[in-house]
Image (cartoon, coloured by chain):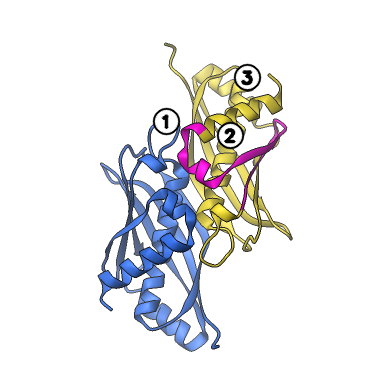
Chain colours: A yellow, B blue
C-alpha cells in the first residue's frame, strides 16, 4: 500500500472509531513518512471569540502525532497500541480560519530506532513535535512523547 | 446571582458558542468558587480502544480551567477575555467511563490577586491545576497558565 492509501485508510478508521473527529471534520491532507498533516474546517471548531477552540487545536495535534507513528509502525508491518504521554502545549496566536496541523518526529529519522525497539523489546517511545500552521509561524505547538507497544500474539 | 446560577448560565453560553462542546455533551456539575467540575459522557468522547479520547480529556480540562477563571471574574463584576497559555498534560491511566474533570487554582486563594491585578493594570495571569478523576488518583492532569484582559470600555 502506498503512503497516500495508507493515510486514507487510517483517516477512515479514525472517523469511524473516534466520534469527536467526525464532529471536528478532520482529514489527513498529507503524509510523507516523516510528516503528517491533518486539517479541519473552522466552523465546527470555533469558540466564543470566533477563532479556533484551543481544545480542537490540541486534539487535532495529538491525533496528528499519533497518526504519524501509527502509519510508521504499519509501514514496518508492526501492529501496535500507540498512546500519548507527557505533552506540552504553547498557544502563540489565535487562528481565524481552517486548522492545519503538522506532526513531525522531534528528531529526524526517529522512526527507525522506534521500529527496532518494538521489534526487539516489544515496546518503545518517541517524541513528536506538532504545530498549527499560522499566518506568521506556528499558531500553536505541541510536543508529546508517544509510547508504542506491540500487540500480543493471538 | 448565586454560584449555581452563574455556572448554569456559563454552561449554556459554552454550549451555544462552542459547537465542539455540544458534540462532547459537556456539563458543569459543580462550582464552589475555588473549584469547578465539568463532566461529559463516554460515548461521544470514546476512542478506537474503547476508552476516553485524549483530545476530549484535554479539551474538557482546558475548558474547566477557563470556566473557573471566567466565573471568578464575573463574580468580581469584571468583564474579561480569558485565554489559555502554556499547558502541560500528563496522561496516567485510561478512563473507561464518563469524564469528570476538576479545575482548581494552582495556589489556593489565587483569584483575589488576579482580580486586583485586572482592576489596577487591566490584565493579569493565574495558574490552574486540573485533573480527570480516575479510579485510583488522577487519570490525567493538566497544568495551564491563563491570562485575563479587561474588556476595553465601550
Compared with A153, B89 (above or below) is below
CA–CA distance between discs 3 and 2?
14 Å
Residue under the image location 31 percent in, 66 percent down: B8
Identify the residue under disc 2.
Answer: A67
**Span highlighted in magenta in the image:** A16-41
Identify the residue under disc 1.
Answer: B49
Identify the residue under disc 3.
Answer: A76
Q: Name the chain under label 1.
A: B
Q: Give the position of the N terminus of chain A as an image quadrant.
A: top right
In the rendered structure, the answer to whether residue A58 lies left or right of residue B101 reads: right
Using the rendered image, report if marks 3 and 2 lie on a common chain. Answer: yes
CA–CA distance between discs 3 and 1?
21 Å
Using the rendered image, report if marks 3 and 1 lie on a common chain. Answer: no
Determine the image quadrant of residue A27: top right
- Crowding around mark 3 (Cα neighbors within 10 Å: few <14, some 14 to 19, many 20+) is some
Query: Residue A85's x, y, as percent?
Result: 47, 41
Compared with B137, A137 (above or below) is below
Q: Name the chain under label 3.
A: A
Amino acid at each position: 500500500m502506498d503512503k497516500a492509501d495508507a493515510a486514507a485508510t487510517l483517516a477512515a478508521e479514525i472517523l469511524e472509531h473516534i466520534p469527536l473527529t467526525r464532529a471536528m471534520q478532520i482529514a489527513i491532507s498529507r503524509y510523507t513518512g516523516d510528516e503528517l498533516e491533518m486539517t479541519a474546517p473552522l466552523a465546527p471548531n470555533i469558540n466564543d471569540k470566533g477563532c479556533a477552540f484551543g481544545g480542537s487545536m490540541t486534539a487535532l495535534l495529538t491525533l496528528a502525532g499519533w497518526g504519524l507513528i501509527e502509519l510508521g509502525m504499519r509501514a514496518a508491518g508492526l501492529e501496535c497500541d500507540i498512546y500519548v504521554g507527557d505533552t506540552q502545549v504553547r498557544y502563540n496566536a489565535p487562528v481565524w480560519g481552517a486548522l492545519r496541523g503538522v506532526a513531525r518526529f522531534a528528531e529526524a529519522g526517529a522512526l527507525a530506532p522506534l521500529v527496532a525497539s518494538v521489534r526487539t523489546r516489544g515496546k518503545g517511545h518517541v517524541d513528536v513535535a506538532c504545530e498549527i500552521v499560522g499566518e506568521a509561524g506556528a499558531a500553536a505547538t505541541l510536543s508529546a512523547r508517544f509510547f508504542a507497544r506491540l500487540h500480543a500474539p493471538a
